Image (tube, rainbow, N blue to C red):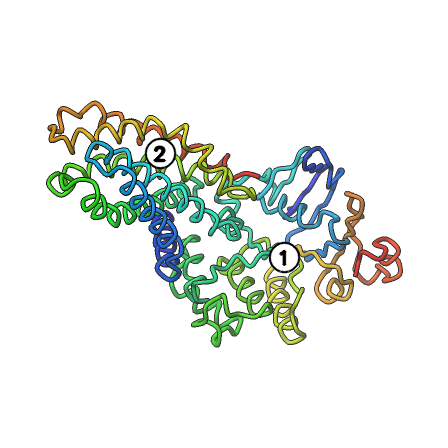
Amino acid sequence: MKATLLLVVKDLRLEWRTREMITTAGLLAFLLVIVLGATRSDPETAPAAMWVTFTFGATLGFTRTLALERDHLTALLLAPIDRGAIFLAKALANWLLLAVVQVMSIPVFGALFTERVWIHLPALALPLVLGGIGLAATGTLFAGLIVQTRLREALLPILMLPVTLPVLIAAVSATAGILDGQSLSAIGAQLKLLGAFDILFITASWMLFEVVLEE
Amino acid sequence: MWAVEVQGVVKAFDHRPVLRGVDLRVGTGETVAILGANGSGKTTLLRLIATLSAPTRGTVSLFDRTSSPAPDLRRRIGLVSHESLLYDSLTVEENLRFFAGLYGLPRDRVGSIVAEMALHRLVGRRARVLSRGQRQQVNLARALLHDPDLVILDEPFTGLDLDAAARVTATLRDRTARERTILFTTHDLAEARALASGAVVLMDGRLSPITPPDQLAEAQLAEMFGNARR
């Protein structure tokens, strides 16, 4: 756990100094919201537009967090720490990055798509957090798999998106339900699915990361 | 006890063998230079010994234990590789503190390695602004932070000026005096003679027997490596 925290703090410190990932992912997310909003900005399309934005912004950020580590992976792999700790640290850093993108994008959604975003903001946090964790876990696993390849930016969405489809469908559905004013119990099935996917993918990735990082 | 025991190791990439049956035994406290031309597989061999890669065939044992990426075995290895392994946006001190944390070392360990390697002038500088020689010295400090039993160095003298090279040599000699085992790769017989008690030559995927470096002749190496050596 100490190693995970050390790695996360290091990642956040590096990001704070360069602001490379948050600028790239945030800018892409912002442009997507504007383009989607200009195309069709009614409340019904808001949940799908939201998750399309988060997914593409996150994908770009995920590739960069592990690419940043590519040259230092040797030192990390040689350190006497569990490889699962590296996964947890990267996934946590990726989730934090995605959360920042979400926080930056939500006001734009509120302004362009529907003011219901503001009314239901506390409840909206649930699918945003659960869906974000699912995206971060899968994104980190696949980014680890392709970090040494040249076409990693292109490969990540191809590998990651089919696997994250259950998360995206459940997240869009839960977000739509909340924006429609449904109670949390009414969207319980989607939230449970998101929670189950998160647990399953974090556990599997934590166990598999050792194999993933091998040459 | 053998610090490093490599037996019949074959390593292939995409079915193309780089190492074709390598045997090597290095005792505790020995310093061995691995000489070889570019692309001869020196780095591949070092990565196998450092548990960063698994052999296609054969076994690698460290300290009489079959090499595996187990954390307690990795703790006994210090590696200086071709890559810098330092985070450019962190200062030297932050880099060393980060790696000391990964090894669970006390906070004052960073101060002592900085003092030992005379890195005081560099501690506040970001790794990005360091010269090649300074980077190499900080990398060596990073690799020696946890006082490993086995120090593996991939061409540690490349790009160093005479002063920096002398300092690296002194640091490594100090490790040898403390019964640490050192394996390093080099193109240069003079470097091998300055530091190593034994030398091996890697050519065509095979390793020569360990020989005292003085007994290896420049002419012999030049013939073996051809023009690729320099």
B2 left or right of A124?
right
- Residue that badge 1 annotates: B153
- Dot 2 falls on a residue whose secondary structure is helix
Q: Is residue B139 toward the left or the right of residue B200 in the image?
A: left
Disc 1 marks a residue whose amino acid type is: Leu
Q: Position of residue A121 (x, y in %)?
A: 15, 41
A81 above or below A47?
below
Determine whether B135 is above or below B18 in the image.
Answer: below
The reply to whether callout 1 and callout 2 are in contact (CB within 8 Å) is: no
**Eyeballing the image, is B133 above or below A101?**
below
Amino acid of disc 2:
Ile
Q: Position of residue B6 (x, y in %)?
A: 69, 42
Which is nearer the eye, A119 or A11? A119
**Dot 1: element:** strand
- Let me know if marks 1 and 2 both belong to one chain: no
Q: Is residue A112 above or below residue B183?
A: above
Residue at point 44% right, 48% down? A64
The C terminus of chain B lies in which quarter of the figure?
bottom right
Closer to us: B166 or B15: B15
Which residue does the numbered mark 2 point to in the structure image? A202
